[in-house]
Image: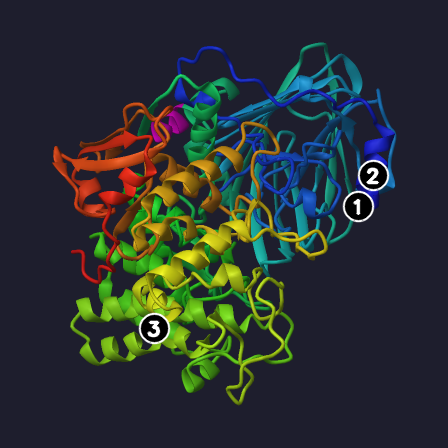
Amino acid sequence: MRLGYLYIGLFFIGLNCSPQPKNPEKHNNIYTYVNPFIGTDGPGNTYPGATTPFGMVQLSPDIGIPGWDRIAGYYYQDSIITGFSHTHLTGTGAGDLYDILVMPTNDRFSQQIEANNFKPFSRFSHDEEGASPGYYWVNLLDYEIKAEMTATPRVGVHRYTFPENDSTKIHIDLGYSLNWDSPTKTFIKVVNDSTLQGHRMSTGWARNQRLFFEMRFSKPFTSFVQEGDSTSSKIVLHYQTKDEDQLVIKTGLSSVSSSAAGKAIQQEAKGGFEEIKQKAEQEWERELNKISIVTTDTNKKSIFYTMLYQSMLAPTLYSDANGEYKAANDTEGKHLNDTLAKAEGFSRYDTFSLWDTFRAAHPLYTILQPDRVPDMVKSLLAHYQETGILPVWSMQGSETNMMIGYHAVPVIVDAYFKGFDFDAELAYRACKESAMLDERQIDVYKEKGFIPVDEGHENWSVSKTMEYAYDDWCIAMFAKALGKTEDYSYFLRRSENWKNLYNTKRTWLQPKDPEGNFIEPFVPKEYSPYFCESNAWHYYWFVPQDVDGLISETGGMEPFTQKLDSMFSYAPEPGDKLPLFSTGMIGQYAHGNEPSHHVAYLYNYVGKPSQTQKLVRQILSEQYKNEPNGHCGNEDCGQMSSWYIFSALGFYPVNPAQGVYDLGIPLFEEVTIQVNRDSIFTIKAKGVAQLPYVEKVLLNGKELQRNYITHKEISTGGLLEFILTDDPALADKNSKPTPMVDEIY
């Protein structure tokens, strides 16, 4: 795979040497500050294509070559495009989707290469490419064809502008696959000279995916040739074009039927390309306008609004307009009609990267997406009703079982305590039953109070124990609120299971064998199978349900502070083996991977908020850039970007299900947030560019005697003022350690 990249880079050397997209000098609309190319280089794994907020369609260019760098289909360092497919994942480490590839060609270029499986391609240059929310364009240099993309929630819209040519072709390739994705059954039907229907069934990271489509062309094709077999259907449409001729293609998607996909076109994609593009831009403008920032730094403004944009690329819409969708209980061999479900009164979402997004993305949605949060929770509960378990990492109506924990639980519990409307008893039953299963080593966890080391690949025993314990705390709080006293006591005891792996002699959370003996030798900085994509340094701090208890186990405030200091100062040595996901390093802290995301805020708990403020500023400035290589790690379906949004506002949810946000320091002098439609929450920090510490914080004119703010205080609107200083001692003098708050509401 890497050889393929090298070949392409050498073959077309010198074509893609342009710098990253420049920021415009002046903007009339917020959406124009967004740079969709952030994360398309380096480890970000984002895509630059056209989509709408939380939309089903992600119409984006595909390089056509597999590999880690091209998980999202596109890689900024490459210099060819093999087509434009309609579905992509944003910022993950998993290679799936890439459904329904479309590529325009003519007889000006016919070269083929093995690296992209001998499919049609064209060179392109970043000098002749651009993207903004809801829109992507590029000139396909070898054909002199301009390609433009826009989208509605369920429809991808292409516009191609051609040169004069008697052999213009549109290739529609359902056999195209990349990375983990593989088609299992494909079909294309020619309805008439301007309409196609079909489906692409596939398996990959998500098994048994079903995608139906209808494709409508603004001009009839003169002839066509169908190729391939039942797993690689392809059709080539023929046109004769004059100079500047344009063709618009509208592709509706559905997990139910081609006719449903056609209805999506009728309902959502009326009018021409420009009209649809304008509606997509307006939709993004409405969403981005929920937060207004005051700054003269256009780079910071671009980063902020790009992060806000990327926070809204997942979860993705999954149901048709009438509520129908392929149920999550679908298995190979079942008749389609037996696997349909219907979302009654809500929109069904999927692409839940819960191990990542429970930490900050979903809490951010409770502030900015109050209308969507109930639908997201109901979508999680629909998955439970269809399968008997809450999703772990679900997409396209399928459970991938990627990563660990049962982190739909904190998302549901957080939404419950924040007052969102859904069936609480159903939600509690889903949470409890998901935590009582005898699979994914939960049976062993229930029996022993920890998960021991075994011979399995990626055992992740310490990480699983700690994440299960956190989720159990969430269930305990839910049970208490619903008056389920026995369950409350049971799950509260389970939430302390992390202590069963605490080695007091070494002051580390350490793996045990099945007999309960600590594993030796044990080197905390090593990346071992005992920790999920991390080491003992990263996971030491993951006790958000009981930070006070962790401080106590560590030996008190002073030893805890010393260990926290070491986390950020003990840098890897040159000979240390660092895995792919250890990026954004500050000492042992790895901002490129989610388990570290709350750690900088833990200084609040030991009366050292100045250190939180210093580190948060450092991470904001060093780990996010307004350039293609602007993410220090996988963006992960909105988590990396949501960390930035929260931290730039001046607070962060250390415990994501507690309704509490720990205070940091704002990045901007003034921010206004639209909350609950008719309320405004304003944040002010005068002199923030010169003064790096917080002397005190006022809420509605009254000084806060704590280092946190509640969700209720934000959602009712008001004014939060940070009074700043250049003296860290003064910042710490007025601080009180943050207590753990079991009951906020």
Left or right side of 638 for 726: left
The residue that disc 3 covers is 495
* Mark 3, secondary structure of its residue: loop
C-beta proximity under 8 Å, tags 2 and 1 = yes
Which picture quadrant has residue 116?
top right
Q: CA distance from mark 3 to mark 2?
A: 49 Å
Identify which amino acid the numbered label 3 is placed on: Ser
Circle 2: element type: helix
User: Is 550 or 441 nearer to us in this picture?
Assistant: 550
Q: Nearer the viewer, mark 3 or mark 2?
A: 3
What amino acid type should be assigned to the residue bearing mark 1?
Arg
At horizontal 64% and vertical 58% (from top left) the residue drawn is 204
Q: Name the image colouring.
A: rainbow
Q: Main secondary structure of the magenta part?
A: helix
Q: Within the magenta stretch, is there residue 201? A: no
Q: What residue occupies the far bottom of the structure in this picture?
A: 515
Residue 713 percent coordinates (x, y):
18, 43
Q: CA distance from mark 3 to mark 1?
A: 44 Å
Sequence-earlier tag: 3 or 2: 2
| Residue at image location 58% in from the left, 30% down from the top | 37
Secondary structure beneath disc 1? helix
The residue carrying mark 2 is 6
Separation of marks 2 and 1 at Cα, in angstroms: 6 Å
What residue span does the magenta drawing correspond to?
282-288
Nearer the N terminus, badge 3 or badge 1? Answer: 1
For this rendering, which residue is in front, 40 or 686? 686
